[in-house]
Amino acid sequence: MNAERRSMHVARITRRYNGKTYVTYLLRRSFREGPHVKHQTLANLSHLPERLVDLVRRSLQGEEFASVTERFRITRSLPHGHVEAVLGCMRQLGLNTLLAAKPSRQRDLVLAMIAQRILFPSSKLAATRQWHSTTLAEELGVVGAEVDELYEAMDWLLQRQSAIENKLAQRHLAGRTLVLYDVSSSFYEGHTCPLARYGHDRDGKKNLPIIVYGLLTDSAGRPVAIEVYPGNTADPKTVPDQVDKLRERFGLERVVLVGDRGMLTETQLQALRKHPGLGWISALRSQSISDLLVDGHLQRSLFDEVNLAEITAPEFPGERLIACYNPLLAEQRQRKRQELLAQTEKQLLALTQEVARRTKKPLSQTTIAFKAGRHIHRWKMAKHFLLTIADGVFAWERNQASITQEEQLDGIYVIRTSEPKRRLSAADTVRGYKRLAHVERAFRTMKGIDLLVRPIFHRVEPRVRAHLLLCMLAYYVEWHMRAALAPLLFVDEELDENTAKRDPVAKTEPSDSVKKKKETRRTADGHEVHSFRTLLAELASRCRNTCTITAAEPDATFTQVTECTPLQAEAFRLLKLS
C-alpha cells in the first residue's frame, strides 16, 4: 500500500496557448516496463484549490496530517478587551505616576482595584476572586493577591491622597477657573465606623446611618479632590475645608467656587469674602427672592421681553444678581403645586368625614391636630391651608393669599456672584452655576450601577476614606473613557459646544446628531450605539486564549487574542489604543 502510494505523485503541467499560460494538475502513477518508466494519469486535480492540491502532494510524499481538534486545543479563554481598554486609558492618563513615581506592589494593587471598580464593582474580597475571571490580574501582576494585601494597599493609598489631589489640581485647575463643589451621602451597613452618623439621607434608606462626602471638580466635571465627613455634618460646614484646600494646598491665586444655595450660606459667603482672590457663584433661596419681589427690587415685568436681567438690592452689597425666568419651569412648578394641593385636600377631606362620624365619642383637639399636621406636612403644603380645630370640630380652607404669593415666584430663580462683569458676563454666570450638573452626574455614576460606591462595608475610618478615594479615581478614568467613546454612546457629542452658544436660561435642546443616533440606534458609520456598560460588555468578548499544540514534544503552549470586531476596533481607535 505504501509502495503503491509512493509511486503516485502530482504532476504540474504548464503550457501556453494564444499568449496565455494554462496550468494542469494531474494525479499520476509511475511504473516501470522493462527499461522504461511510464506514467498513468489517474485523475485531473485542476478543479481543486491549490491548497488542497498541495495537501495531496504532501500526503503522497509521506507527510502525515491530523485534525485540528486532535492536535490543537484551547485550554483557557479569558475576557480581555474591556481590561485592555481600561488599562490602556489609565496608562494614557499617567495614573501610575499620579499614584507614585516608583513602581511597587501597593501601586499595582491600587491600579487593579481602580480598574476593577470600573469593570465589575464589588467588595475587596470579591475582587480577588473576580480578578481570575479576566486578564486583569495577569496584566498587572497581582494574580496571587489576597484580601489583606488589598487592605494594606488602601492604607498606602490614603497616605498619598494629598499628593494625588495636588497633582490633579496642577493638571486641571491651572489659571483662573471655575471649581465645582457639591456634597452627597451614602448609607452605611453597620455601626462600628465613627464616620457613620444619622443625618440627612439622600439615598432614601431609613434607619441607617450615613457618611457624607464632598467632591471637588473642574468646570468640565473631572474630579480633583474628595473629602469625607461624619454623617451628621451639615453641607455648609464642609465649605471651609474646601477653601483651605484651594488656597493653601493647591496654591490657587484666582479661582471661582460654584456651590448651590444650600451650601454657600450667608455665613460661608462672609468667610469667602475674606479671600480677595476667591470668587464664588451661588443662588438665592426662595424667601430671599420673595423679599426682592415685595420690596420692588425684582419685578415680573422685567421678563416681558427677555428671560434674563441683572438687578441690584441693598441687602446684597458688592454682589451681582442675575434674575432668570423660565416659562417651562414655571409651568412645571404650577402643575406640581396643584397636584400636591389636591393630594393634601384629599387627606383633609377624609379627616373631616372621620371627625363628623365620631358623634358619640368626639375626637379631641389634640388628636385632630396631630392627624391634620401629619397630612399637611406630608406634602409640605401647611403654609397653603388655614385650619380650624377644636374638640370634635375640624374645618379647613385654602390660604389663597399664600398660594398667590408663591405663584409669583414660579419660573424665577436668581443667581448671585462676587465676580465683576468684566470677568464674567451675566450669561456665563448662569452657565457656570448650571455646571453643577456635572458634579451631580459624578455622584449618580459613583452611586449607581457603574461604580457602586454603596453599600459601604468597611469597619474602620481610614478604609472608608480610602474606599471613596478609590471610587473618585475610578470615576476620573471613566470620565475620560466616556468622553473618548462619546460617538458610540447615547450622549450628545455637541452638548458642550452648544451650551457655550445657546440661551443660558432656555431649555436645553438636543442636537440633530444625537436625535438621529437615538432614533436609529446606530452611528453615522453604522455601528450600534451602546450605553457605557453594554459597550464594556461588547469589548469583553475579545478574549485572550491559551492554546496548546499536542503534537509537539513537550506540548507547546501559546496565547492568542481574538481578532477585533469592527465595533471593537472603532472603540480602540477612539481610545487611541493600537
Image (spheres, grey):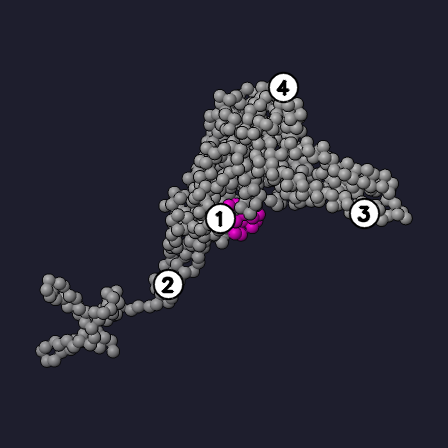
Q: CA distance from mark 3 to mark 4?
A: 50 Å
User: Which circle's residue, 4 or 2, is located before the other in the chain?
Assistant: 2
Q: CA distance from mark 3 to mark 1?
A: 52 Å
Residue 250 position in % (x across, y down): 51, 27
Q: Residue at x 23, y 69 (%)?
A: 47
Which mark, by number, is residue 353? 3
- The residue type indicated by label 1 comes to Ser
Which residue is labeled 4 in the image?
314
* Majority secondary structure in the magenta region: helix
Q: Secondary structure at mark 2?
A: strand
Which mark, by number, is residue 531? 1
Quadrant of the image for the N terminus?
Answer: bottom left
User: Which circle's residue, 1 or 2, is located before the other in the chain?
Assistant: 2
- The residue type indicated by label 2 comes to Phe
Which residue is labeled 2 in the image?
72
Residue 227 image-quadrant placement: top right
Where does the magenta region start and end? 117-130
Q: Residue at x 10, y 64 (%)?
A: 18
Horizontal side of residue 17 vs 176, given as left or right: left
Q: Residue at x 85, y 39 (%)?
A: 390
The answer to whether residue 469 is seen in the rendering is no
Q: CA distance from mark 4 to mark 1?
A: 50 Å
Residue 310 position in % (x across, y down): 55, 24
| Residue 388 falls within the magenta-colored stretch | no
User: Which circle's residue, 4 or 1, is located before the other in the chain?
Assistant: 4
